């Protein structure tokens, strides 16, 4: 059958820029998938999406004029219902056949086939393949219904009466199969070959498309439009780099801004503008944000990543003299920058500390109180963390309280004081005009205002960094104050919202609790913060004493789930992760070392046999009561028992010493030396002996072996 390439285009009013690329990709994929499902396009057919501010289009390769006929098997009913005892058709069967346009003569053509426990009657026929016009109409209707449109518009058609719904009003439909128009309709429009070019710069308008394959070229040459989102994005990036290089500068790297600007123009033209250098006295984060968010400009940075007073704009027109466009944009940006300067100047008239009482007037959550109450909880959790660090330094002593810190840990006393001070100030920039205008600057402005108040860089950086990490791959806090404060802040949020039942569900996570949990994991793992997780959660939950029942179990499970996701992204296998997580490791900084050890162990020739033995031992021990006490040598009878007992006693100090030093690879590798004794024990010894004392002694021997084998990870996970 003959094939031609297919083009479908919707010409619309300006589409939402932040969702344009997603709409374009969805429109193309939905339409193509439905055509493939109907047999009009091959499974590997080339699909090209086009999306510009005023159009959604798709080009699909090798679409058939008519799909191939296909066999269809219709299940009618169970044989016992369709045929009587004599094998004649029942009224129920005749009625079903009539519904298919068949009569009693079709009974002889029916096929019997098993269907579950009973036989059923089937009618096999050949369904004619769909023709391209009907198939494209079905595919377009399907795509229009399934597009990911968060909010649709209602508008009237030209008749003044009919209302239709779409993301934006549609004014044109193109459908070409090769060079022929496909007679389809959508939203009251009939398909044709005419589309519109650039609103101001098209050489020809309308553009009469010759064929599906000439679409992109004709729009570019006659309509002054780059229809492909990807090509337009690449062209903008190229122009940005070229114009910036002429000034010896570099444009800010912001993929989201580049996507948004790509969705705002059809023929990009990058121009250079500038503003009064006096505005550079305002923190560059403020200026960059206002230019990006409000004006869609690309600020220019010097080689030291400092903001300059120049910026790049992406225009949708290319006049011979761009002076008017540049001048207009420079006039528009000035009041934006002046607002930022005003906010900055006004905010500095009050110190951060003077704003502290106002936090009690700001509601954090109606079930968790004010921001002021929240700050007190963060301080309490920060106090607990510093006290735990002190107990770590004393090698496991009871957690000291503040008076003891002053005498025994003067260094940590300074950390405690700094954390308390930083926690008190960390949320105060939420009350400033600048953060009120640009919430994205929370933390950043707190750092600037703390420096202005003379609080020192360590404290200032901790105020900014306590929000970190904000996203995957973000930097971690720069100093110890920031690490403790960030950990306390995230734990306070997690515990509070878990405590009142505000858990994430499905893809909904309005309080970003998954991100907070990932932040806790990274702070404990990447910063090698040696705090046991369960004790940390218990001490942090104490800040909410009496407010709600402890959510520790649910929260620990939630963090463990996030940890497994992090480890999968790092390339560890499900087996490796399961073996380590099964032991519920308390020190997350040890987890990567344990995983490396597990990977090395799995490569040993003895690994499979030891893993199988470990699994067997655990199954035996599960079925018996937990026995306490040491193995009694006098009850060991067989030579294999004695050999295993000696091997365990020789191996135990080696494994424990390696584990204590964090040499988990050494600890697991050492287990290879006990394989022969384990194999011999199971070959020669009956564990469940009739004599109760001997049986219990052998179970204790296996329990000691199990404890040794699972010191680093549950190696039974590697048993096939």
Image (spheres, rainbow, N blue to C red):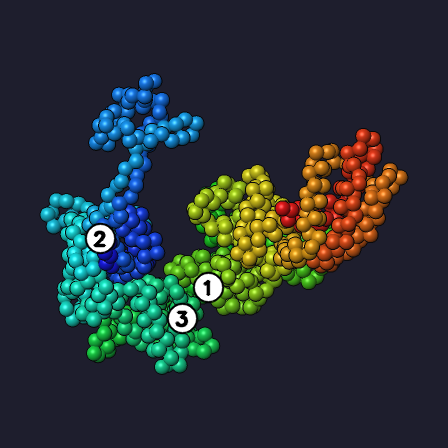
Q: With respect to residue 72, does 151 lie above or below?
A: below
The answer to whether residue 82 is left or right of residue 115 is: left
27 and 526: which is toward the camera: 27
Q: Earlier in the sequence, mark 1 or mark 2?
A: 2
Q: For residue 259, what is the image quadrant?
A: bottom left
The answer to whether residue 130 is left or right of residue 311 is: left
Q: With respect to residue 683, does 592 lie above or below?
A: below
Q: Is residue 423 visible?
A: no
Structural distance between the alpha carbons of marks 2 and 3: 49 Å
Q: Looking at the picture, how far across and down is residue 258, in whole percent?
A: 35, 66
Callout 1 secondary element: helix
378 and 98: which is toward the camera: 98
Quarter occupied by the N terminus: bottom left
Q: Looking at the picture, how far across and down is residue 246, in whole percent?
A: 36, 81
Structural distance between the alpha carbons of marks 1 and 3: 20 Å
- For disc 1, the marked residue is 445
The numbered mark at residue 148 is: none
- For disc 2, the marked residue is 65
Q: Earlier in the sequence, mark 1 or mark 3?
A: 3
């Amino acid at each position: 059958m003959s094939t031609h390439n297919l083009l479908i285009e919707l010409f619309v009013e300006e589409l939402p820029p932040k969702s344009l690329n997603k709409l374009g990709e969805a429109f193309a994929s939905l339409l193509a998938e439905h055509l493939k499902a109907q047999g009009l396009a091959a499974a590997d057919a080339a699909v090209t999406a086009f999306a510009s501010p005023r159009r959604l289009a798709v080009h699909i390769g090798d679409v058939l004029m008519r799909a191939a006929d296909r066999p269809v098997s219709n299940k009618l009913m169970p044989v016992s219902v369709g045929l009587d005892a004599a094998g004649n058709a029942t009224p129920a069967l005749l009625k079903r056949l009539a519904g298919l346009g068949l009569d009693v003569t079709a009974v002889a053509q029916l096929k019997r086939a098993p269907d579950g426990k009973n036989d059923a009657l089937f009618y096999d026929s050949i369904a004619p393949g769909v023709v391209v016009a009907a198939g494209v109409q079905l595919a377009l209707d399907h795509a229009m219904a399934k597009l990911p449109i968060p909010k649709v518009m209602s508008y009237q058609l030209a008749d003044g009466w009919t209302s239709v719904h779409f993301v934006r009003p549609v004014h044109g439909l193109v459908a070409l199969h090769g060079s022929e128009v496909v007679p389809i309709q959508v939203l009251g429009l009939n398909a044709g070959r005419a589309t519109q070019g650039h609103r101001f710069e098209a050489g020809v308008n309308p553009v009469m498309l010759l064929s599906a394959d000439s679409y992109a070229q004709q729009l570019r040459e006659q309509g002054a439009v780059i229809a492909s989102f990807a090509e337009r994005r690449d062209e903008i990036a190229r122009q940005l780099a070229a114009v910036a290089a002429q000034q010896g500068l570099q444009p800010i790297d912001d993929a989201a801004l580049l996507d948004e600007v790509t969705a705002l123009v059809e023929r990009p033209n990058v121009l250079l503008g500038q503003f009064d250098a006096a505005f550079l006295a305002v923190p560059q984060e403020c200026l960059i944000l206002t230019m990006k968010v409000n004006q869609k400009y690309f600020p220019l940075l010097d080689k030291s990543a400092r903001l300059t007073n120049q910026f790049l704009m992406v225009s949708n027109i290319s006049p011979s003299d761009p002076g008017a466009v540049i001048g207009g944009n420079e006039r528009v940006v000035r009041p934006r920058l002046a607002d930022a300067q005003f906010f900055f100047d006004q905010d500095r008239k009050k110190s951060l500390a003077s704003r502290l009482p106002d936090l009690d007037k700001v509601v954090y959550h109606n079930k968790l109180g004010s921001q002021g109450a929240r700050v007190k909880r963060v301080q309490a959790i920060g106090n607990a963390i510093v006290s735990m660090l002190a107990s770590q330094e004393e090698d496991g002593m009871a957690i000291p309280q503040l008076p003891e810190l002053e005498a025994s840990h003067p260094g940590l006393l300074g950390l405690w004081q700094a954390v308390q001070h930083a926690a008190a100030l960390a949320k105060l920039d939420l009350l400033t005009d600048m953060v009120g205008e640009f919430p994205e600057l929370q933390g950043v402005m707190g750092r600037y205002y703390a420096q202005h108040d003379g609080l020192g860089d360590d404290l200032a950086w901790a105020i900014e960094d306590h929000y970190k990490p904000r996203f995957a791959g973000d930097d971690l806090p720069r100093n110890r104050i920031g690490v403790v404060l960030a950990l306390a802040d995230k734990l306070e949020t997690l515990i509070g919202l878990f405590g009142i039942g505000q858990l994430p569900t499905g893809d909904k996570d309005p309080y970003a609790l998954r991100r907070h949990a990932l932040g806790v994991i990274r702070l404990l793992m990447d910063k090698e913060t040696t705090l046991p997780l369960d004790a940390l959660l218990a001490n942090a939950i104490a800040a909410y004493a009496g407010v709600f029942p402890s959510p520790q179990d649910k929260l620990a499970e939630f963090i463990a789930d996030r940890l497994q996701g992090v480890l999968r992204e790092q390339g560890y296998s499900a087996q490796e992760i399961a073996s380590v997580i099964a032991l519920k490791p308390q020190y997350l900084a040890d987890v990567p070392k344990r995983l490396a050890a597990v990977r090395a162990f799995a490569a040993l020739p003895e690994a499979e046999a030891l893993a199988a033995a470990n699994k067997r031992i655990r199954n035996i021990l599960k079925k018996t009561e937990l026995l306490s006490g040491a193995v009694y040598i006098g009850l060991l009878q067989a030579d294999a028992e004695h050999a295993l007992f000696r091997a365990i006693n020789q191996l135990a100090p080696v494994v424990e010493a390696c584990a204590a030093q964090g040499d988990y690879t050494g600890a697991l590798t050492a287990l290879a030396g006990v394989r022969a004794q384990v194999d011999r024990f199971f070959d020669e010894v009956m564990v469940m002996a009739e004599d109760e004392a001997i049986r219990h002694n052998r179970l204790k021997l296996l329990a000691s072996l199990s404890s040794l084998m699972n010191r680093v990870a549950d190696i039974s996970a590697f048993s096939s």
